Amino acid sequence: MSAGWFRRRFLPGGPLPAPRPPRPRTSPVPYRRPRFLRGSGSCSSTADSPRRPEARPVRCPARGRALPWNAGYAEDMGVSLKGHGSLPGLRIINAEKSEFNEDQAACGKLCIRRCEFGTEEDQEWLTLCPEEFLTGHYWALFDGHGGPAAAILAANTLHSCLRQQLEAIVEGMVTTQPPMHLSGRCVCPSDPQFVEEKGIRTEDLVIGALESAFQECDEVIGRELEASGQVGGCTALVAVSLQGKLYVANAGDSRAILVRRDEVRPLSSEFTPETERQRIQQLAFVYPELLAGEFTRLEFPRRLKGDDLGQKVLFRDHHMSGWSYKCVEKSDLKYPLIHGQGRQARLLGTLAVSRGLGDHQLRVLDTDIQLKPFLLSVPQVTVLDVDQLELQEEDVVIMATDGLWDVLSNEQVARLVRSFLPGNREDPHRFSELAQMLIHSTQGKDGSLTGEGQVSYDDISVFVIPLNSQHQGSSSH
Amino acid sequence: MSAGWFRRRFLPGGPLPAPRPPRPRTSPVPYRRPRFLRGSGSCSSTADSPRRPEARPVRCPARGRALPWNAGYAEDMGVSLKGHGSLPGLRIINAEKSEFNEDQAACGKLCIRRCEFGTEEDQEWLTLCPEEFLTGHYWALFDGHGGPAAAILAANTLHSCLRQQLEAIVEGMVTTQPPMHLSGRCVCPSDPQFVEEKGIRTEDLVIGALESAFQECDEVIGRELEASGQVGGCTALVAVSLQGKLYVANAGDSRAILVRRDEVRPLSSEFTPETERQRIQQLAFVYPELLAGEFTRLEFPRRLKGDDLGQKVLFRDHHMSGWSYKCVEKSDLKYPLIHGQGRQARLLGTLAVSRGLGDHQLRVLDTDIQLKPFLLSVPQVTVLDVDQLELQEEDVVIMATDGLWDVLSNEQVARLVRSFLPGNREDPHRFSELAQMLIHSTQGKDGSLTGEGQVSYDDISVFVIPLNSQHQGSSSH
């Protein structure tokens, strides 16, 4: 999330927001020393870390155990955290726009256990032996809004939801092709229409597990926030390395990219009111009661006012990619369902993202109009076939919250990566140092790096994941 | 559409379709001599043409004049058809799967007139002088199903709908950036939230006009078919060259590609029950009554039967890109909303496309379950900035109905184009000859060309549009 009015995702007070003209990104603002979290793959903080919120015990759905804030993760996942240098670097900055850091993160080893054929879910897990476990790695960034509560819950919960989902299908994942029946039972009727099967790939199962895990985590967060009287939501960006593939699941406006010597490849897309305009307008078309007569579904190039009545003005509706003209009626003068552009774009005048976790209680200020029906918790999942890449030592995946991408383009980040890593081959902490350097370059310390000297006042979290070492350690063992 | 049971889009009789196992594309089938239409940019037929359907007069919505089947088009659009060689080649083949050719086409010059500021729509058009018209070119392919009626209506109607839409916004198109108010009126209030405007481009207006024209044409077809007691639908693929850009609008499973010396670029995507699965499932989720209790919204790798009850099987719902397992309940045994894969995929067991024109009366056989609510008439529009290309003489756009693409890949078509054009520079008919050669290569005459010797038994239509000459003639004059 961005700092102050410059870019607030969640507007906590006042009337329906009247977007101010965008402040130029290059405007000179006093530099404030950032506070860094130096992680070793998990979110353990250093003396330099921001103040923690009061740790409320959070119930972990997978085990029913209480977990303190942002800890206990390693144990819960069977994580064996490696030391600095061998694990990808993580840096988090609290830009102090809020008292607590709304960015949260989690990472660790993912151990998926195997259950016996045909047993019930609540039956004892059959632990054959450690070598038969399927293992992978997990990294996650959560960018909170309306407080850190949802992001903290997500950092404590999502990996457990994912492990549960994966354990439920692990029998289908270890075969060449997932069987139609999870039990391996074969039905071979004579009628050909019941025989021909679509070819489902193992990666389709992992994608399905990620989608289900996000949704389950969203439900957990909804229950927990309601029970504890807290509010808020968060975006979620997750990378999972499993069976030689890297899965990147995104719900929100964080971003992951692959940086190689000759290639920069986006591994995620952002979900905002602008990028999901048609889905959101379509929903308001089907369920107009969601707008309670206070908003207009239509998009206009700017907000309309009385003088526009009867004029032919540009507009777009849910079925349109292009623009057309329409005669302005009185109902068109209402506040738009999606308003503003770029960083200023807001859903129902309130929220700058259209996917994420939480926000179950979020309403348009002073109304009963809910945001949640317009939000999706399901992520979009991209699959990178790491086994098919001829990996170089300095091939990395960069995951970061929007604060970084507001200031640096994919190409600029790639240039920084390529200029930093080759000269620091002997540094065991070089991936963590790179994450820190990327954040530094958004703080106005080195304008020449960004080309623009642009400055970010948002909380920023960055993971640097080296694919080469990760690849070696991510296979089933 | 495909021939016979091999690939029927519309199943005209019998019980709910039991998909047969796919017939291998390479299977030997007796060759049947194709019948060619040699066009000069329009659909005028030669002595070798297939039998025409009884020409029913069709009312043209733009002018209210009755047009005979597939004629009168040039006059209506102000088209000045050029001779062979200067106009893109068109070839149509009737594979004789139906008595009448369900493929229809139209092309010609598009003259957009200008109306005076502020006048009403029904007022006299102000013809300043011919030089002030905005002109472009138009090509369209329509692949009918359930008879040729909808395709014929579309070939007679869509260009008029498009011209009307473009004339309604032409004042916005001739400025550098479309104005917020079509009248040019400027409202400049002091409140900044009413001032900042999104930057809309001229091409966004043309995209909007194409989207509206498709929808209007669909309504016309619905009225005309009902009035004349006819049925059927068609896909629509349209290319419009205007102001230095080529707009490709697609609703259905035809395809357009750009072929250059070093590049093959898709200019359209196909819309089928498989490619639009999530949209269609989502609709059934929101409006379950559309399935009348006879279909299941869920997707399974194959159709389920009684033996599967209680088993955990693979499935997908509307919110899922990946697959998961679920326990089979009785309702899952119903016929699937989308069933089959590839060429065999059908919506409600009936239709192989998910976008197009017509089909207003189409129902699942022996039921009242309508197909139309699941179909979109709105196209997806791709814009090719021809002015930005360094055009070579042999850069072409290939538009063709699915019969061609079922047998030839984009790369195979590109190889055929590159092998044919350079050796035929002096032939004034070379683009038409190329279109004919492409169709020939789907008829099993030259297996080495396709690499597979695959044969198509579908009606096929091909436009070859040379960008270089088109580019010169497409600017405003």
Image: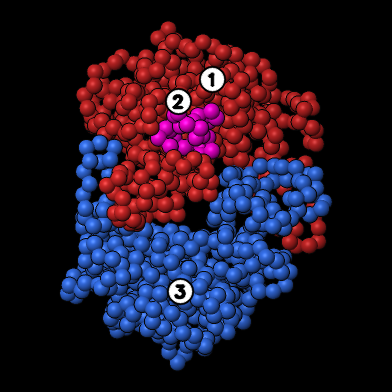
Chain colours: A blue, B red
Residue where numbered disc 2 is placed: B145
Residue where numbered disc 3 is placed: A154
Image disc number at residue B120: none
What residue do we see at 42% from left, 45% from top?
B296
Q: Nearer the viewer, mark 1 or mark 2?
A: 1
Q: From the viewer's perspective, is residue B227 above or below residue A211?
A: above
Residue B433 lies, in percent from the top left, at 38, 20
Residue where numbered disc 1 is placed: B230
Which residue extends farthest top? B47
Q: Is residue B360 magenta?
A: yes
**Residue A229 seen in render:** yes
| The residue stretch that appears in magenta | B348-375
Q: Chain of mark 1?
A: B
Q: From the viewer's perspective, is residue B387 above or below residue A3?
A: above
Q: Is residue B353 magenta?
A: yes
What's the distance in space between the residues labelled 1 and 2, CA to CA?
Answer: 12 Å
What residue do we see at 27% from left, 51% from top?
A180
Using the rendered image, report if marks 1 and 2 lie on a common chain: yes
Mark 2 element type: strand
